[in-house]
Image: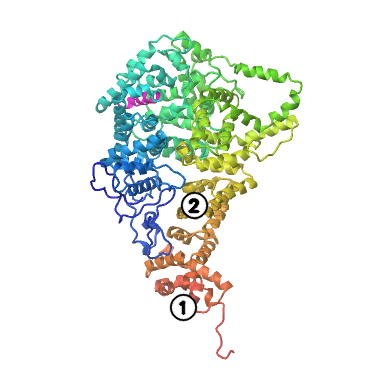
Amino acid sequence: MDPPPPPPPPATAHAAPLPPSASSPAPPPPPGPPPSSSAVSTPPSSSKPSSSHSTSPSSTPTASNSAAPTPHSKLLNHLPLDAPDELDRKWYAHFYHMQKAIQGKDEATALTILKLQPAEGVAPLPFQPDIALLYAVVTDPTLAKQYLRYLTAVAATDNYKNCMGWLQKLIDLKFVKLLVACRSQLLWLVRELVHLNVPGVDKVIVCLMRYLTGGDPSRTTVWLASSIIRILIEHEAWLLSCSSLIPFVFHTFARISLDHTAPQHSSLLKQEVELCTTLWNRRQADVAQLGREIVRVLSDAKDVPGMNALWKQLRNVRDAAEVEKDVTVYSVAQLMAIPTPPKYLAYRLNPKMEEYLIFMMERVQAGSVTRYQKWFSSQFLSSPGSDALVPDLVRYICAVYHPSNQILSSKVTPRYHILGWLYLLCHGSKTTSVLARVQLAMFFDYLYFKASDNIMAVEPTILLMVKSLKSHPMVTLAMIQFLVFAVEKFAASAVNRKLMQKAVIIPPKMPALDVPESVIALGGDDIKHFQEAMPEPCSRPTESFLECLNDILISWIRQDNAVEIAAPLATSAGVFDSMLDQVLSESAELFVPFLKAMYARDVTISYRLLAFCCSRSDTKSTEVALGPYSAFVESIGGNLAQNVVKDLNLSQHIDDARAQACALLGQPLASSVSKDEMDAVSATALFVCPFLFRNMEHPCLAKLMGRSEALVQLLLGLVTPTMLNALCTRVVMREFAIFKNRLTNIVLSSLQWTSWEQYGLWDLVVAELQSGRSPIAERNMMEAARKVLACVNPKESPETMTGLLKCLIHFSPDASVLQSVFNLPDTYEDFPFAVLACWMDKFPNVVTSYVHSALGNAGDGDLSKSKALAEIVRKLDHLQDLRNRTDASESGRIAVLKDEAIIAALKKLLHQPHNASAAHDLHALQTLLLDEEPPHKKPRLAGDN
């Protein structure tokens, strides 16, 4: 990030803040048209211009060290070796250009500029006002009120949609790294937005509450909890009007009250208890959206002073057999009959925890997961009291994350494996109360499982019991014992017991396993009690579905020609799209329940809806195009980013099912290029994925960016050579970009992909790099190359080496990549020589400058002690030897050895006595520099003509 501008001098009461002085270094241009006055500094030793902000001292030659070092950020905490943060850099750029645009303007004129809308014939602003103003408010407390006035005026034009989206993105991605002053300003901004009753600010508060994780009574977390609860108490009327926010608030503060029982937190605990009591007594119906999670949280907190009153109040309500529509007071049985929507459980983990947990369950094979588990424990479960977080992790694994069929059939770490690891953490070293909470979290959905519930919510717990029979029998024993006592505890009333007896247990698909002796140790009475408490297996009941649709189907099958016309219609993809077109023309209140009912019968409905929305988005904005899909995902309690990847994995399954149906009905499998009749794999590759990549930076798809590696791998696993050619063509035409600033992560991830996926990846990389030809694209490529060369095994990853070779030869290298290539060992064989030879032909000045700088710094260096210097000299000797074999004339020198300064430096270096033995093996350089004949030639006799 570039240095921040100095504080503006005081101006008139209504004057806009002044921009930085003209002498300040220019920041990088923001996305969009760059300003014409952006300055670019050129180091004196290089003919290639580069911005000072992208130059790091460790990766540049000595000759260019005069460039200014990367300054400190005004927004984020940076360690000395951290690279400039991309979001920080871009947001500062927007802020800088906004300051420049409103320099010296009064407030009315400044607002006119900031509210300028794109129009034909009018040049767009070189910055986004909402981003620039958010940056200004968070980083500049002295002028925060004036910037807030600008922000409210600008953001009101789109009802704060973009403003709230960017604010959520900042909190999700960078809150942990924010400077202390910026965190305080951020909370001040949220308080002001709540005071103004801004639409969408409730979602911002939910994002902030994600960082109030259980088991973390640290100073920062206590400060954040105090700040948020102060805002909510000050605006109690606003809070009580936000039905969607109330469950999150109650869940969060009831949960973290366990961590604030120490005397120094008594004031905060009192506020938390009062807030939860207010919400429970005045908005119990809204709190009840949490479902059975309320019972678990209040049960855990029943020993906390003040919270025990709520638990007793809940337990004293008379149980009713069913949940009434207009109920105002809920009993334990009624709440336990309501499954908790996954979104409430997911928000009990902060974004980093969720990301790393999903990584272990999606990307790490079972045999390699131990070191990742140790790292996760050291990061999140090593502080005192962090064991209280384990039940929230267990609930996330069981009730939130449901893997796709592709992941279930792979060798990655299964959920029950992670569940067993967390269980053993508590079983071996934690208190009895914590272990009981973990066990309750594991069996919570199992106790009241119904036919309409998702079997995946109980699958990992049951698998853990079965898989532990032989390896950890005491774990299975403890789990069965807890289950027996849990049935007693939660069946305190006759109604509650009856509800539990109605639970549906899916019939087993494997023969019964022999019970080991360690389980028999339970005793006859306990086992008999356990068997009596468990209901008999039964099949899933058939549910009625839309009586009017039933009448239509009956009238359809009575038609004389029903069989003849049913086959082509049943195998046509366009029929379902036509139905979706009609359904989505209705309001969300009508089409969402309809789609949800269909999804309960066929999970591929979700994919078909996603493909339909993406393929008909030509004239719509991103949020409008994905609106139906987002509403549907929210209704099933899903996460947009996770559901997108999960649904796209169904593409091949849908095509296989369609092909089987065509074969059974004797219909030809039509292959059409139209959107309506295109097969699912083609639709995913040619419409859905390009749409997602094109809009990846939009706030509603921001979380999908964290899964871009999985999305790219999924795409390459589906495409055919024809589809890959079409994608490369569209990338070259700049219809969309796939990699952008995530190239390094994707390339490193691809080292474990199949050969076809890797070759396809590098074809797309070359296409994207050649289409852009921008400094940012080159910098991303060089960064990716440097990191890949540092960890790749050329023998095991020939696809990667081939792809790197195709990319590197097209771009001018920077100093760090040159250093990496020169230092490559002999295991890379001819790869470094091929790349260096090409660079010397295309970019001789860059390579010459680097070698000159390296030799100049070496002085009288010892080749036997300096490995980097020895590698440079050895590779130059080998390159010159290769040139001598094809061209022995004076013009046959490689480009670097045509520089007199380099020749002089090499002569000085090789004449040193301590380099005599090393110089003896450098035949090509000896011949060129010291005027010696090659050893294989005989000296010419004086009498020869």
Label for residue 930?
1
State the quadrant of the C terminus: bottom right
Instruction: Looking at the picture, tell me which residue is in the foreground, 284 or 732.
Output: 732
1 or 2: mark nearer the eye: 2
Q: Amino acid at mark 1?
A: Leu
What span is colored magenta in the figure? 247-260
- SS at mark 2 in the image: helix
Left or right position of 116 against 455: left
Q: Position of residue 476 (x, y in %)?
A: 49, 24
Q: Is 39 rendered above or below residue 723?
A: below
Main secondary structure of the magenta stretch: helix
Mark 1 and mark 2 lie on one chain; the one further toward the N terminus is 2
Q: Does 511 appear in magenta?
A: no
Q: Position of residue 448 (x, y in %)?
A: 49, 17
What's the residue type where badge 2 is placed? Val
Q: Single out the residue that lies furthest toward the bottom.
A: 943
Q: Are marks 1 and 2 in contact (CB under 8 Å)?
A: no
Identity of the residue drawn at 65% across and 37% down? 679
Q: Which residue is mark 2?
A: 788
499 vs 18, nearest the viewer: 18
The residue at the point 37 percent across, 18 percent down is 283
Q: Residue 332 at what x, y percent from top left?
A: 42, 14
How packed mark 2 is, by other alpha carbons closer than 10 Å (few <14, some 14-19, many 20 or more), is some
Residue 214 visible in the displayed image: yes
Q: Quadrant of residue 246?
A: top left
On screen, residue 179 versus residue 460, left or right, reads left
Separation of disc 1 and disc 2 at Cα? 38 Å
Which one is nearer the viewer's eye here, 715 or 422?
715
- Number of residues whose C-alpha sits closer than 10 Å to that of mark 1, classed few (under 14), some (14–19) or many (20 or more): few
Specify the quadrant of the image occupied by residue 248. Answer: top left
